[in-house]
Each structure stands twice: as structure tokens, then as C-alpha cells.
Image (tube, coloured by chain):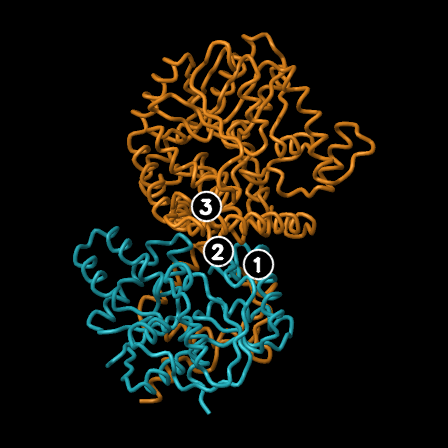
């Protein structure tokens, strides 16, 4: 199968290793990965901050870029949630019938990375080897908007050498929330302090998630405090092999 | 019309208020402890209900139906309440409601009133209006009493003194009730409150209550509570005045079957409230001789007009969203500058009163969705928050730097080639801030990121560049 990669703008720019890992995993499974250069951003930051009209051209670009893609995989639960939860509403608000139709067609073909593996491709064992202690932060959008449930965990449990340690208070938000982290920096930092305490209490070497935006936030504090604990996207763990 | 919500118009913006509150060790400990306890209890009694999701759907449907026909159900309530011997008064805004209540009390010739379970009275600043008219209000709900005696403000819609622990409460009681040797055990405090309140129940002949529900079909008023103080308030005095927001009406008596399951389980983690008081008009020889209902609009019909946010009025004030909210958990309710705090307050306050006084509230959320998950009537709070943010932007409340940055980002992200150019630009511009692959001090708006966290420097090669090179 040809799987179109929607890398998402921030992964493209800040976390290219996650993209490389997704490619490695999907190719290991025998699929062809395609990358359309015209892709850019889902508009989540704009939309969630209240800049709906600024988000709209980004939706248009997404729809234009991926119009004829069969299956689209994105390694970001919040970007997939943006597409699934808000694109249909934005298209409807634009009054453009054609766009509504195209969005309706495209949305069911978009999969978050762990959904892609577990639901669409039906695999949980990627033959990965990662000899480290890991804890999983479920990411609010993955948990509540996409309902990923235990999919990320199922994937991690089949990784050789990996010891998964339960994250206490896992379902609490890390405090990122996009521009929330900037506009309400004090509360965001207080939430992050709670998350850090939980991550550090596990004693894990690595904190993982289905979303690099949460990890960027968590890592920001782990790094500032020189804890030595690192963050890695789920795809990077699944791509690791002996 | 003068619509206001407590002192929200004069309140500090959320981020500023929160900055002080997150540094309050005792407050954070109290809020965390209390919300954790209630959340755990709620989860236990919700999980045991096999048709909880269906109940939520039904609760939502009843509320949506009622709001669509609100005029009809309110008039039906008025007819039936009047028929049963009650009197119904309509108040367009806070000032009008205050005037009605003050006049009703003056007509009794009394100068003291007891109050119970009425957050709405804090919304309209009733106590101030009463005091200005020479009438002394006594709060009789234990938590409201703690807030009143402590000269404090409520911080939670169900547990108004949630931010206080028992040692602090002891101090307030000791000072105000003049009890030199009061202990700090829950039973000591409850006993002190009991003695103090019993005297009021037996001597004050006028009471003001709120209501959880009005039933249109029967003209009944419903108050649920845990202490029994409410029961005494609505049954002992000669005159009872109930102040109720117009969104509290439900069509039929049997609708209570749904809400009296949803509310206690969501609010306090109880299967049923210990006290459920339902009364209809007046009954000769039993309970108040005179009964008034003041129906309050105070901005509610404005909320109703906005299709994308009107389900805010579905709220049954259970407080589950406050207990679930990771933002509320850090700040407590005072940061919201309103009697309605937490996620529901963040959407309700800016809709009731003009946005200009509370435009920071819709941003007081990381949009994690925990509120929506627990809401017993399925109010999609995150979606309404985003809708209100769009309104704040539209009305020009957000800083110009942000608006400019968002416009620029929208242009830069509108195509793959533009993104590629922006990536190159970001890499070229970051060198003054980069240190060992990390950005530790960024300028402008981004400074509040690096105040608390590092940021990895933009790597030398983007994914798309790697892909192109790979061929």
C-alpha cells in the first residue's frame, strides 16, 4: 500500500527524526511511503487560539495537497484531532459545498500513527528492540479526542528489551495547550511541574507519547532541570532495532 | 440593562491573578487534595451506573429541548407556581433582582434574613444590596458560612470554601464566633456551626434560597444538599424567597429522575443527595406562609441567542468540570475573578457580561478536554472556549503582536514552499539564542516559554530536506 505521510509542520521543522522513524517503520512493514512537498500545516494553532480565518487557508492547502491520497498517516494526535474534529465544521462554515464534500472524503482517510499501525494495518509487533525503561504520557488529544485507548501501549509492550513503567496521574494534561503555554505561562509551568514529578517518580529513562508537542513541553522542563531523562516519540522507539 | 457577574468586571485578567495564586502553597495543597478526593468519589459512583452515557445524552436532550422552548416552560412554571399559592417575579438583570428582593423583605418588616444554596445571589451581589438596605444576611450553608465569616470569596460552585482546610476554618470560627478553645477536628467545627446556625434558623423569619431545578408542569422548586441546613431554611421561616436563573427550569416532574441521578454523582460523588427538598407553592399550616420565586435573566437570553454556545445554559452546576480541570487544580476558583470558576466559569462569565471584562477567561484552558469528559449534560466546553476565543480575536482584544504573528504564520504556512523558506529563516535567525543545541532565552512573546523551559534549537536539516536528499 502507498501511505501518504502528513509529517505536520512542527515535526517537519523541529523533529525530523520522528518523520524518519515513521518512514522506517512503515517501510519495514513493506509499504511505500509518499511525501507530498506541498503539505504544510493543519491550522491547529490558529484555530485553537481563535484565528479561524487565518486557519482556513491552511485547511485549503491540506485538502488540495492530499485530495487523491488513499491513506494519510500523521505522527501527531493533536493535528489528527484538529482535522477530524474541526475541518468538517470549518468547511461547512465557509459555505463552499465542494470543499465540504472534499473534507468529508478526506477525513476518514487520515490516521494517527498508532491508529495506522493497530487499526488500519493490524500490527502491534514491529520487531523493535529498545533496551530502556520507558513511561508513556497519553496526550490529551490522543486520549480524549481520538480515543486511542491502549493502542500506544499495545505497541510498546511488544518492543524487545523495553520495560514500560506506569505513569502516575497519566491522564493529567502536561500544560502545553499550544499558545496556552505562552499566554498562561505560570499555570502551564505549574501543570508541567506536576507532570515532571510524575515522570521523575517512575525512574524511567525515557518519556514517550504520540505527540511531539506534549513531549517538547515535557522535555523543555526535563532539560532545564538537567534531569537526564529524555523524550522520544513513539515512532522513534518502534523504529529502533538491534 | 446592567448585566454583571459578581465582581468579575473589576477582576484582574486570569494570567495575572493566577501568577499570585500558583505561589500559594497552602491553597494549592487544599485545592489539589479536595478535588482529588471528589474526583475519586465521582469516578467510583459513575462507573457503577451501567447506563451513564445514556443518562448524559438524555440530560443533554432535555436541557436542549427546554432551552428551545424556554419561554413556554417558564410561563407554564409561573402559572402552576401561582396556582399553588406562590408568587413569581421576573428580573431582567442583577439590579432589578436585588430591588425585588429588598422590597419583598422590607414588606415583611424584618431586618435579618437567612440564606442557603444560592450562587446566583453572589452573581447579582445580593448581600451587598441587602446590607446597603440595612438588612443583615446570614449564610447557612456551612461552606458559604465559612466564606462569609472569613470575609472571603467562594472558590467553587459546589464547595465554596474548598480552598480552606480545617485549620484555617477553625481560625475563622474561633475569631468570629468568639470560641477561644475550639478544636480543629471536623466534628468540633460542625458542632460550632450547628450552635451558631440553629439560633438563626429559630429566630430569623425570612429566608432566601437558590434552586437546582424548577418544574414547569407542577410549579415545584427543587433544592438538593448534604447538610439539612437548606431543608431548615426552606421550611422553618415565615417567608421564603427563591432566586433562580431562568435556565433552571425542566418541563416535567419525571425529568428529575434523570437529573437527580446525574447531579449528586457528578457533584459530590454521592448516589443521592442526603436532602432533596421539593416544594410547591404554600401549604396552610406547614412551611412558609409566603413564597416568592424571582426568575433571573441577567444576560442568559443573550447566551441563548448564540447557537454555537447556548448549550452553556445546560449547566446544572455540579462542579465536576472544576474538579477535573488541571488548570483549576493549580489556581482554585479565585483566579477566574467570578463566582463561576473553572471551565464552566471560563465560558459562562464572558457570555453573561460583556467580553471586555473577561476576555482572558476563554484562554484559561489547555483544551485538554477533561471537562467535557465528565460533564453530566455533555456541554462541549473546549469547543465553546475556542468559539469564544474567536470572538475575543474578532473584537480586537488580543495583543497586536499576537495578531501580527498569527497573520504572518498563516501566510508562511499556506504552502509547502513557503514553509520551507520559513524553516530556513528560523534556522538563520536562531544563532544569537542558541547554546549547545538549546534555546534557553528567547525574546518577545516566546520569552514566557523559555522562562520555564528549554527549547531544542531548530535542527540543521528539516524532514523535507532529508526526504529530498534521500531521493
**Which residue is at the front of the view, B394 or A26?**
A26
Ranked by sequence position, the earlier of labels 2 and 3 is 2
Determine if marks 1 and 2 fall on one subunit: no
Residue at image location 42% in from the left, 84% down from the top: A239
Element type at mark 2: loop
Residue A42, percent from left and from top: 34, 64
Is the Cβ of the residue at disc 1 closer than 8 Å to that at disc 2? Answer: yes
Q: Which residue is mark 1?
A: A191
C-alpha separation, residue under disc 2 versus residue under disc 3: 19 Å
Residue at image location 60% in from the left, 18% down from the top: B113
Task: Look at the image and give the colour of chain A.
Answer: cyan
**Can you say which quadrant of the picture contains the C terminus of chain B?**
bottom left
**Which residue is at the front of the view, A81 or A204?**
A204
Query: Which chain identifier belongs to the orange chain?
Result: B
Query: Residue A88 is drawn in which quadrant?
Result: bottom left
Element type at mark 3: loop
* Residue B366, label in figure: 2
Q: Which residue is mark 3?
A: B397
Q: Kindly identify which chain the residue marked by label 2 belongs to.
A: B
**Which residue is at the front of the view, A135 or B252?**
B252
Query: Residue A238 is drawn in which quadrant?
Result: bottom left
Left or right: where does residue A3 sit relative to residue B155? left
Q: Nearer the viewer, mark 2 or mark 3?
A: 2
Is the Cβ of the residue at disc 2 closer than 8 Å to that at disc 3? Answer: no
Give the class, few, some or many, for how many residues have Cα within 10 Å of label 3's Cα (few <14, many ≥20): some
Residue B38, percent from left and from top: 56, 47
Is B436 drawn above or below residue B409 in the view shown? below
Residue at image location 52% in from the left, 14% down from the top: B288
Amino acid at each position: 500500500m502507498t501511505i501518504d505521510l502528513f509529517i505536520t509542520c512542527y515535526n517537519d521543522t523541529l523533529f525530523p527524526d520522528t518523520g524518519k522513524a515513521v518512514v522506517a517503520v512503515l517501510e519495514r512493514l513493506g509499504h511505500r511511503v509518499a511525501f507530498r512537498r506541498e503539505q504544510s500545516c493543519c491550522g491547529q494553532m490558529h484555530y485553537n487560539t481563535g484565528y479561524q480565518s487565518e486557519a482556513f487557508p491552511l485547511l485549503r492547502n491540506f485538502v488540495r495537497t492530499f485530495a487523491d491520497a488513499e491513506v494519510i498517516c500523521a505522527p501527531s494526535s493533536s493535528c489528527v484531532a484538529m482535522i477530524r474534529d474541526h475541518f468538517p465544521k470549518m468547511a461547512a462554515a465557509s459555505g463552499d459545498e465542494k470543499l465540504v464534500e472534499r473534507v468529508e472524503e478526506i477525513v476518514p482517510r487520515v490516521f494517527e500513527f498508532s491508529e495506522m499501525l493497530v487499526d488500519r494495518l493490524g500490527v502491534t509487533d514491529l520487531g523493535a528492540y529498545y533496551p530502556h525503561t520507558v513511561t508513556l504520557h497519553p496526550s490529551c488529544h490522543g486520549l480524549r479526542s481520538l480515543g486511542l485507548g491502549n493502542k500506544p501501549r499495545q505497541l510498546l509492550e511488544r518492543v524487545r528489551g523495553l520495560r514500560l513503567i506506569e505513569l502516575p496521574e497519566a491522564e493529567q494534561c502536561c500544560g502545553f495547550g499550544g499558545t496556552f503555554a505562552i499566554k498562561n505561562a505560570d499555570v502551564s509551568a505549574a501543570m508541567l511541574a506536576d507532570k515532571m514529578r510524575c515522570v521523575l517518580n517512575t525512574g524511567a529513562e525515557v518519556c514517550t507519547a504520540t505527540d511531539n508537542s506534549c513531549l517538547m513541553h515535557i522535555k523543555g522542563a526535563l532539560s532545564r532541570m538537567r534531569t537526564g531523562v529524555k523524550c522520544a516519540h513513539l515512532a522513534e522507539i518502534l523504529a529502533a532495532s538491534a | 440593562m446592567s448585566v454583571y457577574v459578581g465582581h468579575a468586571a473589576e477582576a484582574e485578567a486570569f494570567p495575572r491573578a493566577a501568577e499570585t495564586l500558583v505561589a500559594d502553597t497552602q491553597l494549592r495543597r487544599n485545592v489539589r487534595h479536595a478535588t482529588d478526593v471528589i474526583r475519586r468519589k465521582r469516578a467510583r459512583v459513575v462507573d457503577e451506573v451501567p447506563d451513564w452515557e445514556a443518562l448524559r445524552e438524555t440530560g443533554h436532550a432535555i436541557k436542549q429541548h427546554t432551552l428551545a422552548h424556554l419561554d413556554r416552560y417558564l410561563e407554564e412554571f409561573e402559572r402552576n407556581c401561582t396556582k399553588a399559592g406562590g408568587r413569581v417575579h421576573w428580573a431582567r438583570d442583577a439590579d432589578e433582582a436585588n430591588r425585588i428582593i429588598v422590597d419583598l423583605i422590607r414588606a415583611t418588616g424584618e431586618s435579618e434574613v437567612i440564606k442557603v444554596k444560592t450562587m446566583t445571589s453572589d452573581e447579582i451581589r445580593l448581600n451587598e444590596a441587602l446590607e446597603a438596605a440595612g438588612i443583615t444576611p446570614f449564610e447557612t450553608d456551612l461552606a458559604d458560612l465559612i466564606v462569609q465569616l472569613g470575609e472571603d470569596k467562594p472558590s467553587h460552585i459546589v464547595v465554596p470554601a474548598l480552598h480552606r482546610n480545617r485549620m484555617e476554618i477553625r481560625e475563622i470560627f474561633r475569631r468570629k464566633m468568639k470560641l477561644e478553645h475550639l478544636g480543629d477536628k471536623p466534628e468540633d467545627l460542625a458542632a460550632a456551626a450547628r450552635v451558631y446556625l440553629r439560633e438563626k434558623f429559630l429566630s430569623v423569619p425570612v429566608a432566601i434560597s437558590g434552586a437546582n431545578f424548577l418544574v414547569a408542569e407542577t410549579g415545584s422548586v427543587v433544592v438538593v444538599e448534604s447538610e439539612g441546613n437548606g431543608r431548615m431554611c426552606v421550611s422553618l421561616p415565615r417567608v421564603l424567597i427563591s432566586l433562580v436563573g431562568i435556565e433552571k427550569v425542566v418541563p416535567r416532574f419525571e425529568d428529575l429522575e434523570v437529573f437527580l441521578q446525574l447531579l449528586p454523582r457528578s457533584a459530590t460523588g454521592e448516589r443521592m443527595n442526603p436532602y432533596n427538598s421539593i416544594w410547591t407553592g404554600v401549604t396552610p399550616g406547614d412551611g412558609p406562609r409566603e413564597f416568592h420565586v424571582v426568575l433571573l435573566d441577567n444576560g442568559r437570553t443573550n447566551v441563548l441567542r448564540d447557537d454555537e454556545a447556548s448549550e452553556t445554559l445546560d449547566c446544572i452546576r455540579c462542579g465536576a468540570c472544576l474538579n477535573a480541570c488541571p488548570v483549576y487544580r493549580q489556581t482554585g476558583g479565585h483566579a477566574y475573578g467570578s463566582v463561576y470558576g473553572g471551565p464552566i466559569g471560563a465560558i459562562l462569565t464572558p457570555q453573561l457580561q460583556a467580553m471586555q471584562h473577561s476576555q482572558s477567561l476563554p484562554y484559561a484552558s489547555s483544551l485538554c478536554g477533561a471537562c467535557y469528559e465528565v460533564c453530566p449534560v455533555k456541554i462541549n466546553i473546549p469547543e465553546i472556549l475556542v468559539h469564544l476565543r474567536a470572538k475575543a480575536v474578532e473584537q480586537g482584544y488580543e495583543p497586536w503582536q499576537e495578531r501580527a504573528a498569527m497573520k504572518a504564520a498563516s501566510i508562511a504556512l499556506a504552502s509547502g514552499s513557503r514553509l520551507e523558506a520559513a524553516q530556513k529563516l528560523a534556522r538563520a535567525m536562531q544563532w544569537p539564542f542558541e547554546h549547545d543545541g538549546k534555546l534557553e532565552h528567547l525574546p518577545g512573546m516566546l520569552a514566557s516559554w523559555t522562562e520555564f523551559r528549554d527549547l531544542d534549537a531548530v535542527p540543521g536539516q528539516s524532514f523535507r530536506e532529508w526526504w529530498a536528499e534521500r531521493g
